[in-house]
């Protein structure tokens, strides 16, 4: 396996949390981090900010499943504070109240085994008013109160850090300064790269600027507003998208989304296209290992069986997949394909808020089964005939790449980003108009009626299409773009480039032309820094 030369510095992946039933974004982040470690020899710390009590146990479970490379570890904010002092800062007792939570006032207690990790005080509506975090020995490490103006009513915040004896030593009136202090302590003024995946924590990270830290944000989902919204960027993403230049690098998964972002918020030299990667043949992705090497399109699989891997939320529209299978089988609709499609079945893997409604929809239909969340569900691609993808919006679904790599043919709605970048209709899968359940049913019928030799050729084409997402290739792109980001950062501090930027800003040229000028200067600087390494044939990073 060829080594990828990563830029010098520590590597961090930044996300809000890793849920037990995590979806595509977290899977892509963990896969990328493991590839950095495995191919680049660069350890990666995955940073989380939530208060789940069992991060260490979660890390062990992920290792046992083969999800985490040995060089990747999970580092949680509160676990870190339990074991280490946070240097600097001051206690502002006159401003930040310190009222440790009495056990009798707690409405919830979080434990790791028999050890209490935190206690929570909530109001009658379930809104959090205070969280106190504890060390393993029971001493208070952090008290976070959110009703300092009037007890019982959200308003005003006081966050107090305590020493190993439970005595207050440092305080803040907002949570983001605590996050800043933690990241400063982690990086310790050493060259670092932080790749931000979660849109939740991206709102904080877009303002985190340090001379020794290169920040990158991966946009995993569509940023576009729905129909009828006057603003092109959805409300949950506007505060970040209006300040994308706060990141050194912004990575999107498809060229289509890159073009839309430039149209919506303007051209920017830090915007690049980097797809999600999939593990190479023989590399573990959970327990999903290619049995005996790479899958073969002619491997035994059930021609009637389809799968869905998705969180069960309205955005995923899994009900469309269920309806389409039932129609294709001639159940409940005159649009059924009948004939060869009469035996179609569907296995749905995932959980979420729509689970109960979907159970009611399938009633006693034995052809559709809801399996709930299964961390090893991707192994089903090796034996299923097709994957259904019915989302309302996506960035570029990793599940699509993984299915195609295993020879499982995708049948997908032609939404704005993702499917059309991978699928050539009728050659390596099927694209149907978004929201058209009848067309989805008809595509399943067409696939089922094809001669086996034609189906095998489509599976071969799907597997070839997935190769450009191999982890070595994608990791090379990451190494190159992170290196270029570091060069851009150095050049921004260069008096010569500052002069070029001032000249282009004063001139009457389009923003896109100014971006080209900056990119040319950056590419020149990047080339000078890596010219000696290009001869080796490895990444310029």
Image (cartoon, rainbow, N blue to C red):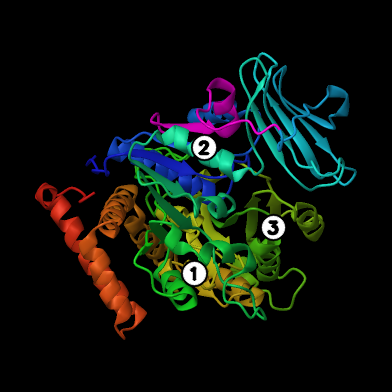
Is residue 78 covered in magenta?
yes
* Residue beneath the point at 54% across and 72% down: 415
Given residues 281 and 239, the one toward you in this image is: 239
Which residue does the numbered mark 1 point to in the structure image? Answer: 417
Is residue 392 covered in magenta?
no
Which span of residues is magenta-colored?
69-93
- 331 vs 349, left or right, is right
Which residue does the numbered mark 3 point to in the structure image? Answer: 313
* Residue beneath the point at 72% across and 16% down: 114
Neighbour tally class for label 1: few under 14, some 14-19, many 20 plus, Cα within 10 Å: some
* Distance from Cα at disc 2 to Cα at disc 1: 37 Å
Which residue does the numbered mark 2 point to in the structure image? Answer: 181
Q: Quadrant of residue 465?
A: bottom left
x and y percentages locating residue 223 in the rendered image: 55, 67
x and y percentages locating residue 110 in the rendered image: 74, 28
Given residues 310 and 22, the one toward you in this image is: 22
Q: Secondary structure at mark 3?
A: loop
Q: Residue furthest bottom?
A: 508
Q: Quadrant of residue 405?
A: bottom left
Neighbour tally class for label 2: few under 14, some 14-19, many 20 plus, Cα within 10 Å: some
- Compared to residue 126, the image places residue 332 above or below, namely below
- Compared to residue 357, the image places residue 506 above or below, namely below
Q: Nearer the viewer, mark 2 or mark 1?
A: 2
- Compared to residue 31, the image places residue 385 above or below, namely below
- 501 vs 360, left or right, is left
Q: Is residue 282 visible?
A: no
First in sequence: mark 3 vs mark 2:
2
Q: Is residue 27 visible?
A: yes
Q: Quadrant of residue 491?
A: bottom left
């Amino acid at each position: 396996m060829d080594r990828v030369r990563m830029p010098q510095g520590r590597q961090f992946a930044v996300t809000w949390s890793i849920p037990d039933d995590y979806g595509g974004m977290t899977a892509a982040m963990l896969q990328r981090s493991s590839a950095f470690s495995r191919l680049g020899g660069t350890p990666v710390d995955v940073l989380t900010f939530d208060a789940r009590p069992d991060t260490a146990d979660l890390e062990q479970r992920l290792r046992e499943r083969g999800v985490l490379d040995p060089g990747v570890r999970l580092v949680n904010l509160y676990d870190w504070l339990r074991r280490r002092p946070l240097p600097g800062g001051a206690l502002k007792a006159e401003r930040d109240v310190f009222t440790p939570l009495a056990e009798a006032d707690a409405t919830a207690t979080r434990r790791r085994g028999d050890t209490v990790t935190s206690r929570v005080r909530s109001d009658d509506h379930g809104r959090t008013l205070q969280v106190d975090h504890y060390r393993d020995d029971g001493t208070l490490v952090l008290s976070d109160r959110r009703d300092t103006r009037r007890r019982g009513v959200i308003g005003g915040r006081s966050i107090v850090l305590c020493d190993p004896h439970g005595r207050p030593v440092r305080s803040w009136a907002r949570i983001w300064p605590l996050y800043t202090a933690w990241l400063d302590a982690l990086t310790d003024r050493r060259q670092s790269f932080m790749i931000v995946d979660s849109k939740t924590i991206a709102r904080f990270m877009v303002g985190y600027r340090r001379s020794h830290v290169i920040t990158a944000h991966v946009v995993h989902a569509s940023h576009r507003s729905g129909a009828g919204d006057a603003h092109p960027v959805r409300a949950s993403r506007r505060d970040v998208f209006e300040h994308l230049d706060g990141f050194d690098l912004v990575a999107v998964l498809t060229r289509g989304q890159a073009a839309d972002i430039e149209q919506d918020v303007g051209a920017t030299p830090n915007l690049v296209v980097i797809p999600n990667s999939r593990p190479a043949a023989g590399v573990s992705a959970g327990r999903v290992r290619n049995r005996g090497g790479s899958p073969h399109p002619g491997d035994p699989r059930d021609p009637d069986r389809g799968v869905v891997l998705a969180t069960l939320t309205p955005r995923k529209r899994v009900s469309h997949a269920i309806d389409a299978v039932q129609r294709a089988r001639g159940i409940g609709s005159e649009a059924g394909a009948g004939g060869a499609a009469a035996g179609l079945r569907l296995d749905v893997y995932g959980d979420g808020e729509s689970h109960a409604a979907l159970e009611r929809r399938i009633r006693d239909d034995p052809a559709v089964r809801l399996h709930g969340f299964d961390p090893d569900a991707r192994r089903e691609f090796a034996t299923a005939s097709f994957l259904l993808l019915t989302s309302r919006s996506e960035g570029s679904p990793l599940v699509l790449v993984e299915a195609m790599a295993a020879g499982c043919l995708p049948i997908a709605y032609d939404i704005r980003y993702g499917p059309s970048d991978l699928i050539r209709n009728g050659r390596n899968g099927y694209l149907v108009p978004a929201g058209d359940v009848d067309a989805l049913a008809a595509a399943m019928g067409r696939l089922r009626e094809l001669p086996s030799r034609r189906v095998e050729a489509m599976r071969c084409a799907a597997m070839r299409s997935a190769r450009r997402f191999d982890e070595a290739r994608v990791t090379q792109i990451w190494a190159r773009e992170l290196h270029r980001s570091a060069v851009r950062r150095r050049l921004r501090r260069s008096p010569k480039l500052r002069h070029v930027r001032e000249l282009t800003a004063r001139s009457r040229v389009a923003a896109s032309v100014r971006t080209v000028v900056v990119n040319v200067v950056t590419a020149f600087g990047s080339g000078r820094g890596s010219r000696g390494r290009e001869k080796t044939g490895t990444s310029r990073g």
